[in-house]
Image: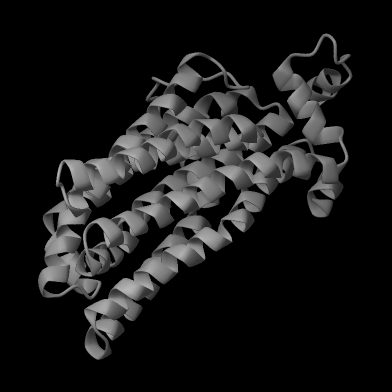
Amino acid sequence: MTKTANLHDEKPTTATADEQQQKFILNEKLNKILWKLSLPAIVAMVLYGLNAFLDTVFVGQLIDETALAGVSVAYPLTSIMLGFGSLIGTGAAAILSIAIGSNDLKKQKQILSNSTILSHLTTIIFAIPAYIFADDLIYMMGGRGEIQDIGVEYLRPTLIGSFFWIYGLGINLIVRGEGKMKEAAFMSSYGLILNIILTPIFISVFNMGVSGAAWGTNIGMIIYSLVGYLYFARKKGSFESDINSLKFDSATTKAILSAGFPGFIMAVMGLLQAAVVFNALNSYGSDQDLAIYGAANRIYIFLMTPLFGLKRALQPVTGINFGANKLDRVKRS
């Protein structure tokens, strides 16, 4: 704690940008901090929500209603990949922000390598079985007949790119854990904008159908991951790290999983809820009802994204102050 205190006593003219950022989070008025961090976080989350919404528009308008129903049935299964990314990313971000606040350099160095290992493991554990049993999974979600076929056609390509879904989100959340919301927002924007551009091209120009929508998202996620990788490869992070390291530490991995698990449970509960709704619509409704529900759900997610942005901005503030033992600021945050 003495080392941390000395860091904050330095004059702003001699402090690095990262040290000034840490000092800002630890000492500035909370309303000013949350306002500054929330705006880029909200913009990034709104862009994500718009991306998911426009995917629905492209499939519904450029293909047909049945295609929209098939994608809607498959979408909750693809969201589990984001759930794994959130499991790793929110857990790693929480541990990192606390380590930054407490000036625990050893823990900071262990974050990226263990997050990368977890990204590989969760990809293998989920993507390979899901690809093999894609037909059964879509059936479980309520897909029947042509809708089942379309759902599988959309799901399998996304599973091929699943590592980048998990790894990209995990890396971006770690950057947010540093308190660098603006940088994280820019990093995510490249992949999301590319997805918006490529999806209608793949669907209409290359006649790839719903698989075109999946590959548009995959390529966006690859760029998303690459930008995050280059950020740490070029040593732009506020903590010492080796993005290429695969050094395993059981205590750090356990801490990441423990801190990130509640968010993953939310993703699983969303999947179970969707399975119940889609099966009910399959039994008592029509294909049109499946499509309408899928579209309405995307709109709902889009409308909720500003709140998600506020949540992302709160995390590094509470984590860094907690690590610095400023518990009153944590409560007031």
Locate residue 80: give its quadrant.
bottom left
Left or right of 292, for residue 2: right
For the question of whether residue 224 can be seen, the reply is yes
The quarter of the image holding the N terminus is top right
331 with respect to 173 (left or right): right
Judging depth in this view, the residue of 189 and 136 nearest the camera is 189
User: Closer to the camera, 271 or 38?
Assistant: 38
In this orientation, which residue lies closer to the viewer: 41 or 63?
Answer: 63
The residue sitting at the bottom extreme is: 284
Task: Say left or right for 60 vs 178.
Answer: left
* Res. 242 visible in picture: no
Colouring method of the image = one colour
Q: Quadrant of residue 22?
A: top right
Residue 297 point in image, percent of width and height: 43, 68
Q: Residue at x 27, y 78 (%)?
A: 288
Q: What is the x, y in percent for residue 220?
A: 35, 37
Among the 4 quarters of the image, the one containing residue 12: top right
Please count the marks in the image.
0
Check the image and report above or below for 325 versus 300: above
Q: Residue 169: where, in percent of width, then height?
A: 44, 41
Q: Is residue 278 above or below residue 1?
A: below
Residue at 69% across / 44% down in the picture?
A: 38
**Outermost top residue:** 14
Taking the spot 28% from the left edge, 46% from the top edge, the residue there is 200
Name the side, left or right, on which 257 lies relative to 129.
right
Where residue 293 appears, x then y in whole percent? 37, 74
**Residue, x 43% and y 70% (percent of image)?**
296
